[in-house]
Image (cartoon, rainbow, N blue to C red):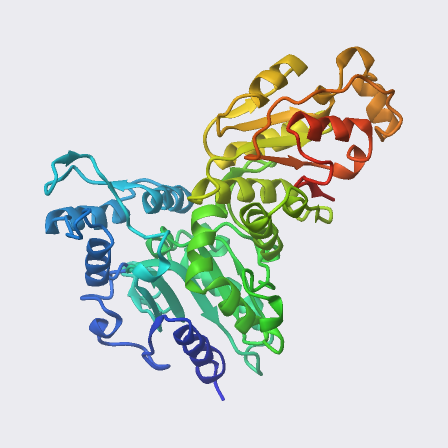
Amino acid sequence: MSEYTEVEQPFLQQLETLGWTAIDQGPDIPHDPEKSLRQTFRQWILPEVFAKAVSVINKTSTGESWLTEKQLHDLHDQILRQPNRTLLEANEAVQKLLFKAQVDVNETIGESNPVVKLIDFANPENNRFHAINQFRIDTPGCVKQFIIPDIVLFVNGIPLAVVECKKGGPTCANPMNEAFEQLQRYMNRRDATRQQGLKEGEPRLFHPVLFLIRTCGLEADFGTITSGIEHFFPWKTQWSQDDKTADGMNQQQQLIAGMLNKRNLLHILRTSSVFMDTDSGPRIKVVCRYQQFRAAGKICDRLRNGKTQADKCGVVWHTQGSGKSLTMVFVARMLRASQDLSDFKIVLVNDRTDLETQLGRTATLIGGRVNIIESTNDLRGQLSTDSSDINMVMVHKFQQREQSLSLKVAEALGTYQAMPSGKSFGVVNESERIILMIDEAHRTQGSELGENIFEASQMPCGSRSPARR
């Protein structure tokens, strides 16, 4: 039994059950690029698939495809041309194109600079999904003449994931570690090679890639182009399906079913992938972990389907370091990307100055302007508007200022249960289209301060979507 029969083939076969078109080139080195839908082994976008798919998903109100052949070629080149950019810079630039590309004119109706969809996020079935194994790319001038990633996943001819398969055995003692090293080689990111002034791999293949997958069948996990080996994680949810559907599945099967079904893959790309600067300096790419995706999805589901305010409330329990601030970001991005929830006013509440700084940096990842509320009067003004904006506020602003403890005293006490009673904060906004996400909710929500928060927006004390450690 081989890596091909035990890992690659089952991977492709499961994708076919999810509606993907799988092209199985066998286990050997490919010699004909046309079998992988290309004219040469230097191409890493599937040109004909790209042109046909993008043309089909861009139509006028009468159902007429309006992109010209020249415009389709220009869109193709917009993805290809990333001069003098690092891999991360190119990846970020191409991801923006996937969300919003433009051409000069819609010649059919005369519109200037129209937006073009490279992917139809609203209707996943309108896109074309291909999985191709043994995807050879020639690399002249490099250490080896070519690379052959085990499986590459394409949407509309654009590579969104690269999969490296390994099988443990006498010649492969640590298959997951070897898969990671191979992915680094494909991206030309191995330090030892660069220190010798050598090149290997084809970084351009990874310019549009959302995430990387390494698998040996029983084990499988994913990371991004900037992830260290310690930041590859398994996918353990089938949301929005019942997680019981994964009973009996190994990690590879769970990841494919939960992460690579058409809807979830495009939803992760659209709402749950961000680029951020770290405290240590380097900029990184982050894709949601399974618990963040499930939590954010459940919050949106409750807002969408809850019949009462109590139905729409909830507590999200996070352990230390599991990414609660990013969960808030993913919730907000899901709201903004949805047709029926995009009008929600978002209020992020925290209770410590250091958390305010941390959450403030993270909140910018939502996109758009974030209103930092500095005073109780400012809070009343911002919260009372009908704007579907994003606001961040310290919990103390919901207390009548003359009766609140000083911030230093409150933080020293470590609780707000003993704060003296103050005047009712009063109703500020009667709209039901407000979501409050409260950091460290357990420290404040059992007190009168918590009651003030929900009275301000006429929400019962249970009606909240806090992120809690």
Residue appearing at x 87%, y 20% in the figure:
420
Residue 401 sits in which quadrant?
top right
Judged left or right of residue 14, residue 126 is left
Residue appearing at x 57%, y 66% in the figure:
177
| Residue furthest out toward the bottom | 1
Can residue 378 be seen here? yes
| Residue furthest out toward the top | 402
The image shows a total of numbered marks equal to 0
In the rendered image, the quadrant that contains the C terminus is: top right
Residue 467 at x, y percent in the picture? 68, 42
Judged left or right of residue 101, residue 243 is right
Residue 147 sits in which quadrant?
bottom left
Examine the rendered structure and indicate whether residue 374 appears above or below residue 258: above
Examine the rendered structure and indicate whether residue 243 appears above or below residue 309: below
Residue 435 at x, y percent in the picture? 59, 36
Residue 360 sits in which quadrant?
top right
Q: Nearer the viewer, residue 423 or 96?
A: 423
Residue 74 at x, y percent in the picture? 18, 46
Judged left or right of residue 58, residue 398 is right
Examine the rendered structure and indicate whether residue 134 appears above or below residue 202: below
Q: Nearer the viewer, residue 176 or 70?
A: 70
Residue 104 at x, y percent in the picture? 16, 37
Q: Nearer the viewer, residue 94 or 325?
A: 325
Can residue 149 be seen here? no
